[in-house]
Amino acid sequence: MRTVGIDYDSHAVHVAVFEDEVLHTFRYYISPEQSSLEILKALEAFLYTNVFNGCKLVVIESPIYIQNPKTAFALGRVYLLVSLACEKLKLVKVTLSNSRWKKLALGYAKLNKQQVFDKMKAVYGDIIADSHYADATGLASAGKKLVEGKNGA
């Protein structure tokens, strides 16, 4: 069973793929010079290559509120482009809030970034290179639980 977690920021998309119990991580960098259409096409190719085959579920972190309008727009744009790429590939996708995926994956909804990183690093080792990979892994883990019907409380 392949489940995927996608965490993003304004300049990169971070992907964790569970293939049964094996974890793979990927990162797609977004160039500031790329148009939205170029990013969409590139993301579609990236996801097709690294995610598509046998994927049961893609879990994307829902956009969060940021007070800086420029950053909020950039994050919303990346979220939309990732969602569109999944739609074009007909991948089953769900968007989960920060607290929901943390509760599913780790049992606690109110963990901070460092706590998530520490827990994921302890379980998966050096493949968890930074907090983005830790979050993507948590999202993929939450996806595994959803596919298995373990929705938590």
Image (cartoon, rainbow, N blue to C red):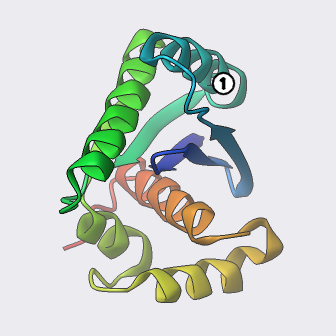
Quadrant of the snapshot with the N terminus: top right
Identify the image quadrant of residue 55. top right
Residue 30 rendering spot, x and y as whole percentages: 59, 35
The residue lying at 55 percent from left, 33 percent from top is: 32
Residue 123 rendering spot, x and y as whole percentages: 68, 80
The residue lying at 27 percent from left, 61 percent from top is: 151
Q: Is residue 131 above or below residue 143?
A: below
Quadrant of the snapshot with the C terminus: bottom left
Most foreground residue, 42 or 109: 42
The residue lying at 39 percent from left, 25 percent from top is: 81
Q: Amino acid at mark 1?
A: Phe
Q: Is residue 66 left or right of residue 54?
A: left
Total numbered circles: 1
Residue farthest to the right? 126
Q: Is residue 25 above or below residue 52?
A: below
**Can residue 146 be seen from the camera position used here?**
yes
* Numbered disc 1: secondary structure: helix
Q: Is residue 83 above or below residue 24?
A: above
The residue lying at 34 percent from left, 45 percent from top is: 75
Residue 35 rendering spot, x and y as whole percentages: 48, 16
Residue 42 rendering spot, x and y as whole percentages: 61, 18
Identify the image quadrant of residue 31. top right
Most foreground residue, 99 or 33: 33
**Residue denoted by label 1:** 46
Crowd tier of the residue under label 1, counting other residues whose Cα lies within 10 Å: few below 14, some 14–19, many 20 or above: some
**Can residue 92 be seen from the camera position used here?**
no
Q: Is residue 65 left or right of residue 141?
A: left
